[in-house]
């Protein structure tokens, strides 16, 4: 195969060197045990020359926010997003450290260690992509300047192209145009399968009130009979609690987990009460 | 004799130290339309006379009368300008290649791009790309090659080429003029404001 | 291997009495995207091995290692095939002649996202975001619009779209295949255990 000098991939070392050579005039941190560019801090951590547990996250964050204030909006985004990667990971680690880990005395230490490995993994992964992106930038920049032959076919040859098969009516064509003009949005993965549709406690309370007032006593089982949505069952239960708070109903339960019997008990009930019911749950 | 030409080129102070023939070849490789001697001389920064001589050298060179072998392309003067053409001996080969290459049907992407151009013409490639939210360079080339669209004019400010559809499209659609395209503006109610009205029928 | 396929092409006797390099040059002159060896062999009706050798001859020839002078163009293997390029020395000359504006540079965020997609494809936006720890939606849209990445398929369970890079990206990078990307695993030495290996080169 003929050698094509342009395509020879560069050894990763070169990529690394390039990254190291990058001017380090970005975000600097001054901690009790470290003073220097943030990038260098990452470098030290990744080479195990510094223990991440010795780095105060809040100190770094404070310094970073102060640094961001001095930045122009353009640099800000890139710098901020870079920091988020690290901050998110640091936070992850702190969370792991804070959560109760069970009986084992060593569990916390183990978790910390795992968290640190996770931090290393993530930091290194992120840095690797960041560094190799310099190679991308260099190649794209170089190739942007290249000129490739992209010349339209000669009239003589153009005639030789096979006859076009055309099957669209003007209406088909218009429909295509509509499709093409429709704003393009990146398909979005809905979260509906994660979050049940919103259920209004107030609406459910209204149903509860109506049902209870009509029959005097009712078991909770009867109150939710035929309801398949867990969210609605929960909302009805919450509205029962809320109505109890307003002394609009009483309930009795003869044994734990036994049948819950509800009884309408309101002396004076106005639907206005309903309007403010469950306000605690409003966002 | 070729060597003298090289000497001239070398003597030429024009900021460029590569041979004149190379510079001419670089320009010839990327042009769509034949280029006249004067324009070519301006492009490569050399006197017309030197460029004329280099062109002659290249013609001979490509025809196998130089040091190297004959090339599969030739340099011809057509309509007052020079351009690279496939050597005629290979026309059949090229015709067969093209015949076997081009799909007889337009892709969905090509059809949608064509529809955008039809309803929004005159329109630049950049404008089409931003509506379609994809790169349309190769699709536009296909449509041009198919004779379904044509270059109308270059924007006086940006130099960007404006495209429009051809009679060939009208024939395919079986309509007489662009006015016969079904209107799509009522259906574009919200979006239509974003476009220059009047061009959207 | 592919040679028997080529025998068919031998049937059209018409074209085959001109030198193979000429026939290859004829095809190279008219293509508007890189052409792979096999396709080229089919187009010129010769065995792949012979075509490969002729390509090497042409590369040398254009670079001035043959009998003739160095040419103002060169033959490069980029994005999975061969294509004629203006020789790098003349890029400035041509750029000045064309006068087009340089395409907008990609942001650092876009470059990093592109790198993640290139190395980890097929990959969903969510996976990219978790590596970059930021929302990558608008960046992905930019990369799609530039034709540098493409939607590969939707995950059968979550419906999340998997993205990969395009041949256009390879061309923009000036490399022939994804194998030409610099290896990044050395950069990941200590931490690499944490990732799905195999996808990381």
Image: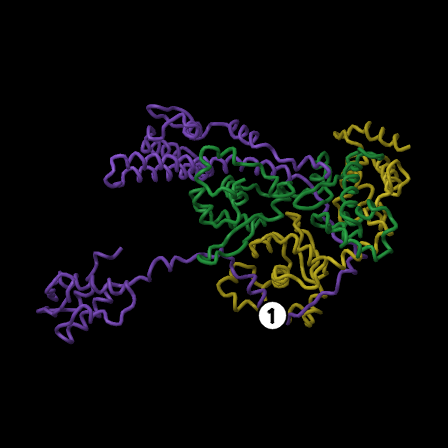
Chain colours: A purple, B yellow, C green
Residue positioned 77% across, 45% down in the render? C49
Residue B88 located left or right of residue B177: right
Residue positioned 14% across, 69% down in the render? A270
Read off the residue under disc 1: A172
Instruction: Depth check: give the residue in front, C130 or A137.
Output: C130
The percent coordinates of residue B172 (x first, y second) are 70, 69
- Please give the count of numbered marks on the rendered protein: 1
Residue B9 location, quadrant? top right
Residue A92 location, quadrant? top left
Instruction: Depth check: give the residue in front, A49 or A158.
Output: A49
Dividing the image into 4 quarters, which one contains the C terminus of chain A?
bottom left
Q: Residue furthest left?
A: A267
Q: Residues within 10 Å of mark 1 (few under 14, many from 20)?
A: few
The percent coordinates of residue A163 (x first, y second) are 74, 65
Mark 1 lies on a secondary structure that is helix
Residue C5 located left or right of residue B67: left
Residue positioned 25% across, 38% down in the render? A104
Dividing the image into 4 quarters, which one contains the N terminus of chain A?
top right
Residue A28 location, quadrant? top left
The percent coordinates of residue A252 (x first, y second) are 10, 65
Residue positioned 46% across, 37% down in the render? C192
The percent coordinates of residue A20 (x first, y second) are 51, 28
Residue B61 located left or right of residue B190: right
Instruction: Depth check: give the residue in front, B171 or C13.
Output: C13
Residue B144 located left or right of residue C153: right
Q: Chain of mark 1?
A: A
Rendered view: C107 above or below A152: above
């Amino acid at each position: 195969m003929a050698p094509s000098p342009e395509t020879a991939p560069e050894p990763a070392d070169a990529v690394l060197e390039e990254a190291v050579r990058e001017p380090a005039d970005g975000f600097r941190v001054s901690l009790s045990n470290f003073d220097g560019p943030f990038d260098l801090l990452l470098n030290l951590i990744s080479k195990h020359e510094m223990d991440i547990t010795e780095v105060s996250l809040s100190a770094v964050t404070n310094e970073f926010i102060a640094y961001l204030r001095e930045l122009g909006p353009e640099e800000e985004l890139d710098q901020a997003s870079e920091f988020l990667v690290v901050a998110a990971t640091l936070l992850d680690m702190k969370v792991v450290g804070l959560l109760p880990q069970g009986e084992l005395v060593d569990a916390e230490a183990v978790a910390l260690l795992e968290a640190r490995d996770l931090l290393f993994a993530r930091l290194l992964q992120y840095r690797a992509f960041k560094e190799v992106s310099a190679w991308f930038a260099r190649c794209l920049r170089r190739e942007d300047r290249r000129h490739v032959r992209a010349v339209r076919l000669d009239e003589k040859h153009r005639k030789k192209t096979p006859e076009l098969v055309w099957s669209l009516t003007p209406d088909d064509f218009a429909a295509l145009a509509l499709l093409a003009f429709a704003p393009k949005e990146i398909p979005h993965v809905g979260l509906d399968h994660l979050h049940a549709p919103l259920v209004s406690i107030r609406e459910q309370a209204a149903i509860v009130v109506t049902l209870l007032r009509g029959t005097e006593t009712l078991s909770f089982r009867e109150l939710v009979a035929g309801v398949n949505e867990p969210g609605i069952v929960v909302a009805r239960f919450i509205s029962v609690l809320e109505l109890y708070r307003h002394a609009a109903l009483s309930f009795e339960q003869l044994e734990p987990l036994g049948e819950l019997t509800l009884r309408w008990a309101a002396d004076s009930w106005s639907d206005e009460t309903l309007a403010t019911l469950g306000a605690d749950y409003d966002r | 004799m070729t060597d003298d030409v090289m000497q001239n080129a070398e003597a030429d102070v024009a900021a460029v130290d590569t041979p004149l023939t190379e510079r001419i070849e670089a320009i010839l490789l990327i042009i769509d339309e034949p280029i006249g001697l004067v324009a070519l001389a301006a492009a490569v920064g050399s006197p017309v006379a030197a460029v004329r001589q280099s062109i002659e050298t290249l013609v001979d060179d490509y025809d196998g009368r130089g040091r190297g072998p004959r090339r599969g392309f030739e340099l011809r003067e057509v309509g007052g300008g020079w351009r690279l053409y496939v050597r005629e001996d290979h026309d059949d080969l090229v015709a067969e290649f093209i015949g076997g290459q081009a799909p007889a049907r337009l892709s969905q992407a090509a059809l949608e791009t064509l529809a955008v151009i039809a309803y929004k013409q005159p329109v630049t490639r950049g404008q089409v790309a931003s509506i379609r939210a994809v790169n349309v360079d190769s699709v536009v080339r296909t449509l041009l090659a198919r004779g379904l669209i044509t270059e109308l004019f270059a924007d006086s400010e940006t130099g960007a080429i404006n495209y429009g559809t051809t009679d060939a499209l009208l024939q395919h659609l079986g309509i007489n003029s662009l006015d016969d395209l079904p209107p799509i503006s009522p259906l574009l109610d919200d979006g239509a404001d974003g476009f220059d009205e009047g061009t959207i029928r």
